[in-house]
Amino acid sequence: MSKTLRIFVPVKRVIDYAVKVRVNPSKTDVDRNVKHSMNPFDEIAVEEAVRIKTKNKETEVVAISCGSAKAQETLRTALAMGADSAVHIEVKDDTTLQPLAVAKLLRAYTDKQEKKPDMFILGKQAIDDDANQTGQMLAGLLNWPQATFASKVEFEGESLKVTREIDGGLETLKTKMPAIITTDLRLNEPRYASLPNIMKAKKKPLAKITPEELGVDITPRIETLKVEEPAKRQGGRMVESVDELLDKLKNEAKVL
């Protein structure tokens, strides 16, 4: 790996993983008036891009976030971790922003670049919707090869070698760049942003752009009708015999 690399790393602002998520009183959404942070899988993606930059000093890492004005906090975190610059695709209401719309925004922004990225590194999924779709959709829209659930990323000349975990063990893929990579938990352990780097991040460039400027319609294709908490689990019941168990499964639980 000797050539200059340009890596785009999309990051998402989500409800912090330590928060107990609750449904709002109107049952239209979850309560979002809680602590937010960068999606943990996206932290892994930023870390991997920064590690690549450490090995190849010519690498440029650009963090991108599609979301409301508060998404800039997440972008500043990515900058403090080591990204060189950031791009905020500002959306008024990001609660209805869906994976296909995000993929289209990322594709449109890529198309407008004079210098195209060599790779996208994304978290495999966001912990709020667990959709696991954006990376695959972006690969389809850009017509780029993809390597998902990466647990190891290596360079072989102008190609990438990606190890990924599958049900039967480990699978190794080799692909040319430009390419899409989505990160799994075992790829690395993200660093904490130090106070000096947090201060330096405030001076790094952060550009703003809108979906309208990119010519992308982000109208939701799926409407959420109602949000409810799962039914509380009831305690188990003791039975005296197999016959009684079968009777209850058949006549009460209705599963037989």
Image (cartoon, rainbow, N blue to C red):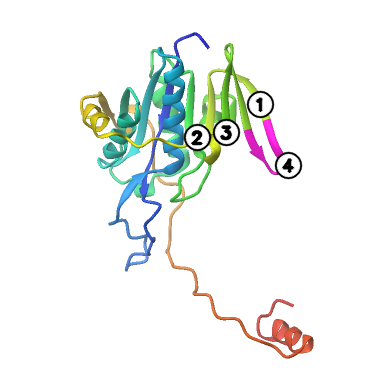
Which mark lies nearer to you, 2 or 3?
Answer: 2
* Amino acid carrying mark 3 in the image: Ala
Instruction: Residue at 26% x, 26% y: name it.
Output: 207
Q: CA distance from mark 2 to mark 3?
A: 10 Å
The majority secondary structure of the magenta stretch comes to strand
Q: Give the label on residue 188, or none.
A: 2
Which stretch is magenta? 164-171
Q: Could you say which disc has been placed on residue 173 in the image?
A: 1
**Mark 1 or mark 2: which is in front?**
2
- Spot occupied by residue 34 in the image (x, y as percentages of width and height): 29, 56
Q: Which residue is mark 4?
A: 168
Q: Which mark is residue 150?
A: 3
Indicate whether 94 appears above or below 237. Answer: above
Mark 2 touching mark 4, by CB under 8 A?
Answer: no
Q: Residue at x 34, y 32 (%)?
A: 78
Q: Amino acid at mark 4?
A: Gly
Residue 58 sits in quarter: top left
